[in-house]
Structure formats: structure tokens, C-alpha cells
Amino acid sequence: MTKCFVCGKSSILVSKALNVCLECIRNEPAKASSYIEEAHSVSRRPFGLPPKPPRDPNGIQCRLCVNECRIPEGGISYCGLRTNINGKLSGVSPEEGKLSWYHDPLPTNCVADWVCPGGCGAGYPEYAYSEGPEYGYKNLAVFFQACSFNCLFCQNWQFREETLTAKKRNVKELVDDVDKETSCICYFGGDPTPQLPFAIRASRLALEQKKNRILRICWESNGTMNRGLLNEMIELSLKSGGCIKFDLKSWNKSLNIALTGVTNKRTIENFSIVAGRIRERPDPPLLTASTLLVPGYIDEEEIRNISEFIASLDKGIPYSLLGFYPHFRMSDLPVTSKDFALKCKEIAEAAGLKRVRIGNVHLLS
Ligand code: SF4
Ligand code: SF4
Ligand SMILES: [Zn+2]
């Protein structure tokens, strides 16, 4: 049981990571904000990451993501990938990135496998090798070792240990590993956003060399990129049969800042932009959404608002509700219950969504 520092309520659904309950985050954001800032600052310190996006008016600006860091001389960016050395931005580039990759036989446990070409043959024969799961082919899973968010429940939090120290790898090394059994490349992490120039360059090179084969370009992201990069991602996925998978962490803005350290404004805008392009290639779906059901923080109201938003854009957008397993700073919360996940599915369907699925079923209690 943890006590909320704002209202004094004790509950197993208040995480020690935040020390603030959902109601106070929603209804008393001014009172909750100092605890929230402290929670993120403390969580980033062991990895040498700055507590907030740097805002030095004389610093060098990066505009790749919503954080729009202004990095002071000798300082480091929020994502940890960029520094200002003698007035020049240094770090990763379209040629060199901080990432790792591996091949995964298809069908994988990708969040979109239930609607995508590799998982179920959607878009066959133009975008898939078979009418069902693409047995005999592989996904190239590309894991970026940095992120533009700071989720306190991050399921892949270990990447932070290497964000500052990882050796950079050349884009050609990655592209050389796209062999003829590779039928999709999926960028995830961390998040592809802070290294999108690298991912876009890799994708273009891979598509140039694939020569009349199917090679889908897919993304799993928090959706915080700038508009220009988003447009390039859309073009790559549209023409290759790939899919853009956005995680919509929460609807309430204060809650998003509490859970991830960053606003969801850009994510919501970007999701709407991608949704506006769905009709250009309806099958396989260009866009999917997912939300992690974090006990105590992602409640029915959040799922209703997110579902109504998605349905207002296109009722056919596939939506995955993901079971939470205690991780990183929020390891004191329980796993998502099956009853709650089923209730959320009902809510999403009542909002009009036609394709709703509960993912990570094995994690539910
Ligand atoms: S967006 Fe994903 S990778 Fe980034 S901090 Fe959140 S959960 Fe972790
Ligand atoms: S990509 Fe990194 S450096 Fe650029 S604005 Fe985002 S967090 Fe800052
Ligand atoms: Zn409270």
C-alpha cells in the first residue's frame, strides 16, 4: 500500500514511483506536478540522462521530436543521443546509430500480427508471401537504444543502461543483414523517433536493393516525431505494405506527463495525420493502436476517451489492449486483471471500434 502525497489515500493502486494517485493527477495537477517531476528526475539519474528536455536559449536545437531540446554547450539531450560540443551537435546521424537487431521467424509476437501480412497474410499477394502466416520468412527486428519518452513502467527499460555508452553502428551493417527471407523490417526500441533519419536511410537502402521482392517497413512508436519525418515514415510504409503501430499511452494530458514525462499532444496529432492516409491502402492496415492497461492509472475513462478518439477517425483501426506486467519503476503495481481487460474491450467496442483485441493474455491475472 502506498499513500498518495496529495490526498493521503492509501492503495495498492498507487505506485511508489509517483506517490500520487490517478484522481489527484487528473484533478489536482498543480499539486501533483512536483512529485511527478521528482519521479522522472530520480528515474533518469542512474543512467546519466537529464531530468527534463534542456531549454538553454543559447543552446543548439534539435527538432526531431516533441521535446525540441535546446542543448547547452557540453550538455546532453533528453534522449541521451546528442551533445553540444564546441557549438556543434554531435552524436548519432543518418549513417551511424545506437541500435541492435536480430531476425525473428514469422509469424512473430508483433503487436499487429493479428492483422498484418506476416502474421495472417493480409494484403496477399501484393504485400504478403502467403495467404496465412508467412512461415519460412523472417522479420528483421531493429531495436533502438534510446527514447523520447520516459515511461515509468517501461517494458524495455534496460536500453537506458546503454544509451550513453553504446558503440555506434553503421547503416550499411544493418542493411547487409536484410537477406532474401526477410519480408519485413520493424523498428522499435526504445523508440525509433530520436533516430528516424537513420531508420529512414536504412529503409531506403534496403528497398533499393531488394529488387522485386516483398519487404515491408513497419514502426512501433510513441508517435512523438516531427511532421516531416512522420510523412517519410508514412510513404515508406504505404508503398511497402508496412504498418505504423502507435502506442497511445493515455488520453488525459496530465496523466501522460505523469506516466511518460512528456505531453501526448504530438502523439495525438500524429495519429490523426496517419489515420487520414488509411484509405490510400486499406489492406493491410496502415495504422494500428495499442494501450498498456496499467493498473490504477489507465482506467475505464482513459480507454473510453482513447477509443472514442480512434473511432472518430476510422472505426476499422485495429486496437490492442495490452496486459501490464510490473516493470522498471512501477514494479510495485499488480498485473492487469482479466476482468478489467475484458471490460476495456467492451468499452472500446461500445465506442464503435470493430477490431479490438486483448494482447499479452498470458500476463493477465
Ligand atoms: S515509449 Fe516505450 S520504450 Fe520509450 S520509455 Fe515508453 S515504454 Fe519505454
Ligand atoms: S530527438 Fe532527442 S535530442 Fe532531438 S528533440 Fe527529441 S529528445 Fe531532444
Ligand atoms: Zn490522491
Image: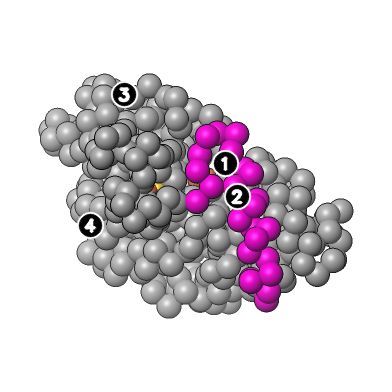
Left or right of 127? Residue 113 is right
Tell me: residue 241, above or below residue 6: above
Pointer 1: what residue? 44
The residue mark sitting in front, 4 or 1, is 1
Which portion, as a residue range, is magenta? 27-52
Q: Position of residue 352 (x, y in %)?
A: 51, 76
Mark 3–mark 2 Cα distance, whole angstroms, equals 29 Å
Asked if 321 appears above or below 332 in the picture, the reply is: below
Q: Is residue 293 above or below residue 265?
A: above
Name the element at disc 4. Answer: helix
Q: Earlier in the sequence, mark 2 or mark 4?
A: 2
Check if mark 1's residue and mark 2's residue have beta carbons within 8 Å.
yes
Q: Main secondary structure of the magenta part?
A: helix
Name the colouring of the figure: one colour
Inspect the image, locate mark 1, and give the three-letter code of the amino acid beneath it: Arg
Q: Secondary structure at mark 3?
A: strand
From the Cβ of disc 1, is ligand 1 less than 8 Å away? no
Circle 2 residue: 40
Identify the residue at horizontal 33%, vertical 24% (top origin): 168
Residue 206 rendering spot, x and y as whole percentages: 20, 33
Amino acid at dot 3: Arg
Q: Which residue is mark 4?
A: 228
49 in magenta: yes
Give me the C-alpha separation between circle 1 and circle 3: 24 Å
Displayed quadrant of residue 238: bottom left
Q: Earlier in the sequence, mark 3 or mark 2?
A: 2
